[in-house]
Image (spheres, rainbow, N blue to C red):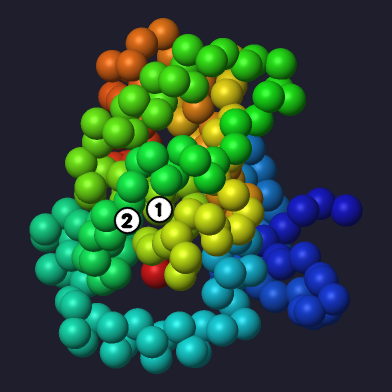
């Protein structure tokens, strides 16, 4: 049976829905597969609460016009910091309550040390952005890093052609084993400042 532009039935949504007009007759091909995945994700994230989201966004955009955000090129991470404020994150407390995953077979204490040095040298705003990138949170929980659950975990990776990535559900930062402190800083800043914009909402 060919895959078409229809949602997949789940326990929460047993009835399939068309992802676009005439979706039941549009087959997924190599040429349109990216559109299909984007529409499917959008449906799962927003489909059942689209009305509520529309009401929320209507109120939000009335206070913070979307056109102004686009004109000023404000990224989602920056907006989160602007709303929640810049919190001073103590890099030593961060390190004291962090875990470094040694189970990946790519352990390198030099890279770990360089990462913490880079964190120490970052500005307050850069540290907040990195924290938000790795955890999805704009603020620490009450009690600070000791009460962050799960604990922030640094995981090293071999492929230095990639940028740092994160698993925000697990508060994990995946850091390729870059050769120098300068490269670690450069690649981290690229990752934490890269944003997808506001087109999705």
Q: Which mark is residue 77?
A: 2
Picture quarter containing residue 18?
Answer: bottom right
Residue plotted at (32% across, 56% down): 77
Q: Secondary structure at mark 1?
A: helix
Q: Marks 2 and 1, how far apart in space?
A: 7 Å
Image position of 63 (left or right of 48): left
The residue under label 1 is 132
The spot of residue 80 in percent (x, y) is 31, 64
Is 68 situated above or below 188? Answer: below
Is 22 situated above or below 189? Answer: below
The spot of residue 63 in percent (x, y) is 19, 84
The spot of residue 22 in percent (x, y) is 62, 70
The spot of residue 51 in percent (x, y) is 49, 89
Residue plotted at (44% across, 20% down): 113
Q: Secondary structure at mark 2?
A: helix
- Please rate how many residues cluster around mark 1, counting C-alpha atoms within 10 Å: few if below 14, some from 14 to 19, many from 20: many
Is residue 201 visible to the viewer in this orientation of the structure? Answer: yes
């Amino acid at each position: 049976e060919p895959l078409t532009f229809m949602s997949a039935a789940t326990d929460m949504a047993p009835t399939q829905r068309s992802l676009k007009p005439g979706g039941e007759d549009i087959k997924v091909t190599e040429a349109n597969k990216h559109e299909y995945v984007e529409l499917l994700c959008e449906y799962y994230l927003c489909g059942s609460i689209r009305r509520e989201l529309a009401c929320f966004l209507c109120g939000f955009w009335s206070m913070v016009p979307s056109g102004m955000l686009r004109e000023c090129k404000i990224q989602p991470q920056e907006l989160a910091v602007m709303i929640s404020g810049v919190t001073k994150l103590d890099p030593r407390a961060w390190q004291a309550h962090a875990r470094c995953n040694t189970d990946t077979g790519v352990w390198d204490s030099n890279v770990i040390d360089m990462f913490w040095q880079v964190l120490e040298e970052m500005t307050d705003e850069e540290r907040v952005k990195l924290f938000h990138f790795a955890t999805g949170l704009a603020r620490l929980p009450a009690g600070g890093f000791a009460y962050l659950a799960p604990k922030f975990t640094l995981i090293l990776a071999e492929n230095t052609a990639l940028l740092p990535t994160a698993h925000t559900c697990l508060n994990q930062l995946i850091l390729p084993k870059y050769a120098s402190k300068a490269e670690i800083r450069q690649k981290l800043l690229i990752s934490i400042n890269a944003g997808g914009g506001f087109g999705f909402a």
